[in-house]
Structures are given as C-alpha cells and as structure tokens.
Image (tube, helix red, strand yellow):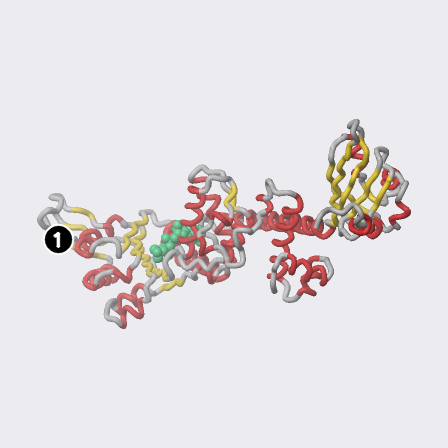
Amino acid sequence: MNFDPSWDWEEIVDNIYTDVIVTDSKGRVLYANASVGYWLNMEKSNMIGRSVIEMEKERIFYPSVVKKVLKTGERQALIQETQRGNKLFVIGNIIYDENENIKYIVTYSQDVTESEKLKTYVKMIEGEMESIKNELREIQKTQSANPHIVSKNEKMKNVISMIDRVAQTDTTVLLTGESGVGKSLLAEYLHDRSKRKGKLVTINCSSIPEALLESELFGYSAGAFTGANQKGKKGLVEEAKDGTLFLDEIGELPMNLQTKLLTLIQKKEFFRIGDTKSVSVDFRLVAATNANLKERIQEGKFREDLYFRLSVIDIPIPALRERREDLLSLIMDLTKTFSKRHQQEKELDHATIDCLLRYEWPGNVRELASLIERLILTVEDHLILPKHLPGEIIPGNLSEATLSVNELGNKTLPELISDIEVEILKNAMKRCSSTTKMAKYLGISQPTVVRKLNKYGLTR
Ligand SMILES: Nc1ncnc2c1ncn2[C@@H]1O[C@H](COP(=O)(O)OP(=O)(O)OP(=O)(O)O)[C@@H](O)[C@H]1O
C-alpha cells in the first residue's frame, strides 16, 4: 500500500504507546498525543499553547528536555520525573525550517520507572557484595596462625583444633580424605605447630619406584650394592631426625616396606641397607592417604597391625563440597595469593564468584587452586569474567548473556536496561517460587512480572 496523505495521522500517533509532544521554538506546546495525558496526569487539550518552561516550574515534569535543547541547540536525551512519580526517558529533536531556524522541537519519551528501580536494586546488590568482602577481610584477620589454611566450617575447625592438640605430643597421626583436600598442607601445619627442632621430610610413597623406595627411606651403607655411592647414603628417615617424617599416599607402600615401617615405628630404630648396625632416630610420623585402608586390608594389600599403629589419631579431612562455607574465603584467599605470587593485578567479577560458589569441586581445593592460578596467568583483562571459566563450571542457567555490571560499556540505554532487567528477573526467579512472590520481592505488580517474563521469553 502506498502513502496516503489523507490518513488520520492524529489517530495513528495517539495510538503509539510513547509520549509525543511538539513545541515551537519558544517551547510552547503545539501538539501532544493521547499518551501524554496519561503520564502527565492532564488532558492533552489543556497542554496546547502552554509553555513547557512553565510546566517544568510547576513540576508537572522535571527537568524539561525542550529547555535543554533550546539552550544547547542540539538533540538531547535525559531521564525526567513526572508529577505522578514516574521516570521517563525523554529525547528532544529539532526540526529546522528552510532558513535553518528552529521550526519545531519534537519530544518523545518512554516510561523507565521499573528499570530505574532495577538499577537501584543492582546497586544495592553491589553494596551487599562489598559488605561480604569486608566481612571476609575480617574473617581472614582472625584466622588460624597459618594464613593459608582457611577453616570457617565446623568440621574443618575441629580438624585444626585436633591438630593443635596433638601437635605437642609424639603420637603418630593419620590424615585421611579425598585427593586435594589439603592433607599435605595440614601435615605442614602440624609440623609447624609441634615446635620440633628438626625439619619436615615428605615422601610420596606412590611416586618413587618400588625398587628405590627402600634405599630412599632407610639409606645404605658404604659399598652396599653395585652403583651405590661409595661412602654410603643417609635415608629420609634419618633426615627427619628430631623433626617430622610425612609419608603421603601410605596406602601405596609395598608390603615388604610396610613390615620395615612397622618395626621402625615400634623400635624407633632401623638398619641402613647392607648394614648390620642399627640406627636409632627420634622423629614424629605423620601419614596420609586418600585410599580406604580398611578395604586395602580386606584385599590383602595393607597390614592390619600397621594400620592400627598409624591410626592412633585418625583425622578425616572433609571434602570441599562438604564445607561450602569455606568456599568464598578460599576463593578470595587463593586469588590474593596467586595475584601476589605472579605479580598480577587481577579481580574476580561477582558473576564469576557466583559460578565458583555453585560448582561441586570434585578435585577439592587443588582443583580450585589450579583454576584460580590458571585464570590469573592466562586472562589478559584485569577483571576475570564468567566467559573465562571452563564450561563445566558455568551453571546451565547462566549463559553467555550473563551480565556483569562492569560489562555494560558500549550498550545503548534501552539495551542496558533490558540486560539488567533480564538478569534481575532471573535472580528473582531463583529466589521466589511464584510470580506473586517475585512481584513483592521486586516491588512491582504481579501482572508486570508476568508481562516482563513473557517479553524476555523467561519461563518459570
Ligand atoms: N584449607 C586450605 N586453605 C588454603 N589452601 C589449601 C587448603 N587446603 C588445600 N589447599 C591447597 O590445595 C592444594 C592441594 O592441597 P594438598 O596437596 O595439601 O592436598 P592433599 O589432600 O594432600 O592431596 P593428595 O591426596 O592428592 O596428596 C595445595 O595447593 C594447597 O596449598
């Protein structure tokens, strides 16, 4: 269909759900459409001939975009408040006559009251996040003597206090728990707390080949076997004199060495390979395992008597998923540690922290620590965003579109408002079980909630 000048333009413009006002070059209203009447709470016929400057003075709306256009001689956009308490996003455009003089100023506006509320809400959430960070700094100040052991969770606090208690004794300690929960770190902590004068000597029983393990542990005498050092060699047990011997992955210790270890624990003496004279040594034994030693006993792979000797004090370390209260502190602590270590000024975005807090962490603190270190080393930007995380860590409902308040850079205002709206609505959907509760939570009406959910294709 072609353009027809006889169309009823007034009726058409009255049916646009956007305020349209046309003024002359002095700001006197020449035309207003029907929508204006609703937002400004006055009949559109009462507006014709009135000065927008006067209306601004009467606070029918404030500020006046026309006034700003006339002052600057350019197109202007601003947020205006109306007598009804609504917030309007208003644009004022100039139409010039053939002599380049202002002929009309056309203004059109859209209600953004709810979006403005949502922006305030985002600011409030940012404020809350800041206070959580402050709280965290306080927690970190009051943490255990070793700054790298985070323990907010009850079970973990019990682990630390148990270690503090046994540290002063010579009792053998067995640390059990999944790989990466922090057994080695706790062995270090125990040694620090024990005030034993000697050093902490760590042996990973699974990483040294079986043939070498015995000589590594007990050493050998001069000329004990072909290829050996002529002067003989001290073993790690001797290295741990007056200190702590930490046997990691004890479940992997071969059977013949289990027997020798048992003798060592009982008599506190041993024989270097090829020697007939025993060596006595004072050390504290700490062992760790992620294997189920009772099962290994059943399978005939671990000596029961050694197990009883080792497990006098058996300290199970909870998996990270069982102590989620520690997660936030760990995330912040590790970020700080690695940023400092690699001299990188990096920060985790709120949405990134949110993803990390939701993940299960099957690889425990080691998995978390390696990820944070990798992000700090590989992400070029200052801010680490959800898009930098590996796929498995991003929850299904947080897609690429996840909005960070810090990402709003080059978007237009309507796009920005929509993004914030979607994000806040998703957040409200997670917290509230019905649209009525969402309405209360967001401070808007229930039909508005439904309309907005439909608009963005969000389904409950
Ligand atoms: N509570 C904690 N606070 C800070 N860092 C921790 C904590 N627990 C573990 N880590 C860090 O996590 C990583 C893995 O810890 P660790 O090597 O002690 O685990 P593990 O239980 O001994 O693992 P595996 O059984 O595989 O030997 C280390 O980098 C350690 O510093």
- Name above or below for residue 103 compared with residue 189: above
Left or right of 108 on screen, residue 263: left
Res 216 visible: yes
Residue beneath label 1, please?
Answer: 275
> Going 41% across and 59% down the picture, which residue do you hit?
362
* Most foreground residue, 128 or 326: 128
> Going 50% across and 58% down the picture, which residue do you hit?
395
* Most foreground residue, 398 or 370: 398
Left or right of 397 on screen, residue 16: right
Left or right of 193 on screen, residue 203: left
* Most foreground residue, 351 or 20: 20
- Name above or below for residue 95 compared with residue 197: above
- Name above or below for residue 100 compared with residue 153: above
> Going 47% across and 53% down the picture, which residue do you hit?
150
**Residue 88 position within the rendered picture, expressed as x and y whole percent measured from the top left:** 76, 46
Quadrant position of residue 98:
top right
Res 187 visible: no
**Residue 414 position within the rendered picture, expressed as x and y whole percent measured from the top left:** 66, 46
- Name above or below for residue 372 compared with residue 316: above
Q: Quadrant of the C terminus?
A: bottom right
Amino acid marked by disc 1: Asp
Quadrant position of residue 441:
bottom right
For label 1, the SS is loop
**Residue 412 position within the rendered picture, expressed as x and y whole percent measured from the top left:** 64, 43
**Residue 190 position within the rendered picture, expressed as x and y whole percent measured from the top left:** 39, 53
Specify the farthest residue to the bottom: 298
Specify the farthest residue to the top: 99
> Going 51% across and 59% down the picture, which residue do you hit?
396
Q: Within 8 Å: ligand 1 and the Cβ of disc 1?
A: no
